[in-house]
Image (cartoon, grey):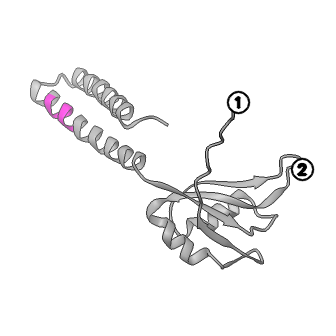
Amino acid sequence: MTSPKTTQILVAIVCAIVAYFISIYIEASAIVVAILVFVSAIITSLFTSNASESATTDVKTLYVGNLPYRANEGAVRALFSDYGKVHSVRLMKDKHTGKRRGFGFVEMAADDVDGAIKKLNDSEFQQRTLKVREAKERPEKQFDNE
């Protein structure tokens, strides 16, 4: 994913190239070139404000337990999307068999987490009663070098 600064630079370069070619083909005066540069700056700021908003959105992780073993990431994403912006879905699988373990994690916009928990905790999904709560931080693994 590109940073807002990179996006701003790319949009500015594209707008400058477009302004250059337009000024050549219409034999523009200095006023027309100034207007084109001004419009380019406005377009650049619009693009970068949207990019920076999405980059600064806080994300929280939800634990989702008692999932049906047949549920897939798409179905879980669709379920949670009704209650806010879903960034990712991870359903845990057994390392040896590859079968789903019946729980997973959903990353959502922080503003939407409380509503999703209220609506989906203890609700029925594919004939199973879901357990939804905010995920606990995984403790760092410590290695003893003794």
**Relative height, residue 54 to residue 129 (above, below):** above
**Relative height, residue 33 to residue 134 (above, below):** above
What is the secondary structure assignment of the residue under circle 1?
A: loop
Q: Name the residue located 38 percent from the left edge and 31 percent from the top edge.
A: 6
Label total for image: 2
Q: Is residue 38 located in the magenta-colored stretch of the structure?
A: yes
Q: Name the residue located 69 percent from the left edge and 59 percent from the top edge.
A: 104
According to the picture, the residue beneath numbered tag 1 turns out to be 146
Q: Quadrant of the rendered structure where residue 116 is?
A: bottom right
Query: Magenta stretch mostly in which secondary structure?
Result: helix
- The percent coordinates of residue 41 (x first, y second) are 23, 36
Q: CA distance from mark 2 to mark 1?
A: 35 Å
Q: Is residue 106 located in the magenta-colored stretch of the structure?
A: no
Q: Three-letter amino acid code at disc 1?
A: Glu
How many residues crowd mark 2 within 10 Å: few (<14), some (14–19), many (20+)? few
Magenta range is 34-39
What's the mark number on residue 97?
2
Q: Three-letter amino acid code at disc 2?
A: Thr
- The percent coordinates of residue 135 (x first, y second) are 59, 60
Q: Name the residue located 38 percent from the left edge and 44 percent from the top edge.
A: 51
- The percent coordinates of residue 44 (x first, y second) are 29, 38
What's the mark number on residue 50?
none
